[in-house]
Amino acid sequence: MTFRNGLGSLLRPEDSVLVLIDHQPYQLANLNSHDPQAVVNNTTALAKAAKVFGVPTILTSVVADRGGVIFKQVTDVFPGQEVIDRTLINTWEDATVVDAVRATGRKQLIIAGLWTEICVAMPAIQAAGEGWDVTVITDASGGTSVEAHAVAIQRMIAAGINMMTWVALAAEWQRDWARLDTAGPLTQVMIDHVGGSGIAYLWEQQLLHTPVAAASSAGA
């Protein structure tokens, strides 16, 4: 296995393309590896981060007329964008999706989806075998059980696939807080979706903008 290390192995927004797979009601109904609300939150945050950094994002569902449409929280990030609906379980066997990815000219392929053990593992393993630099966002994915999610991650790591969470990915894309064109919008995503860290940031801003009380006059 080739180890993933060195500066060049880090993800860059200009080289990244994101594929969000099957974030649908049917899959969410049997999501047991994570809190379902957390996965909706994390997937929405991932989509927003991709938009902040101008990362092309492909949305795909499977048999949406039975499984339901992609979460509104996600599609609202990309208003008017077509969702590619498939019959193939393995997204990477669907020519429409693969052609859309290839058309971006990017080689750092980032995947998140439901369920991890099926709709994430199969395309990730196939794409990695075809030479793509594949990263899976584990907290915007989920499986039918804790075991199913964990075993799928182990299987993909063995296939040379990189694992990250959405906040780690966003930080890697940002890389330098001096990049002001994305620093502000990314901070807003974190305020909206990172819970305690977002609240702590707002508190910090409150403290910085709270005047220090004047000292009482001597003898008063």
Image: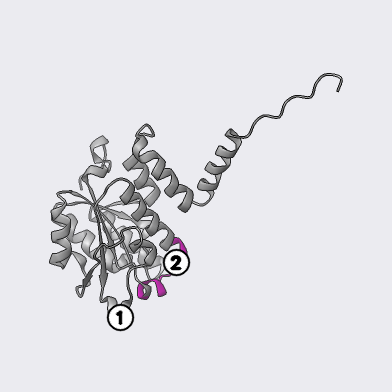
The reply to whether residue 162 is visible in this rendering is yes
Q: Residue furthest bottom?
A: 66
Residues 76 and 26: in front is 76
Quadrant in the picture for residue 114: bottom left
Indicate the secondary structure of the residue bearing disc 2: helix
**Residue toward you, 1 or 165:** 165
Q: Amino acid at mark 1?
A: Arg
Picture layout, residue 124 above or below residue 12: below
Q: Is residue 52 magenta-colored?
A: no
Whether residue 35 is visible to the viewer of this picture, yes or no, is no
Q: Secondary structure at mark 1?
A: helix
Q: Which mark is residue 66?
A: 1
| Rendered position, 120 above or below 172 | below
Q: Label 1: how many residues lie within 10 Å, few (<14), some (14-19) or many (20+)?
A: few
Quadrant, the C terminus:
top right
Q: Indicate yes or no whether the magenta region holds residue 35.
A: yes
Q: Magenta residues?
A: 26-38
Residue occupying the point 37% across, 66% down? 72
Q: Position of residue 65 (x, y in %)?
A: 28, 79
User: Looking at the image, is 26 positioned above or below residue 200?
Assistant: below
Residue at the image position 31 percent from the left and 58 percent from the top: 78
Q: Nearer the viewer, residue 6 or 64?
A: 64
- Write down the quadrant of residue 158 in the picture: bottom left
Residue drawn at the location 21% of the way across and 72% of the way down: 86
Name the residue beneath numbered marker 2: 36
Question: Going by the picture, which residue comes out furthest to the right?
Answer: 219
Amino acid on which disc 2 is placed: Pro
Q: Position of residue 48 (x, y in %)?
A: 36, 53
Q: Separation of disc 2 and disc 1 at Cα?
A: 20 Å
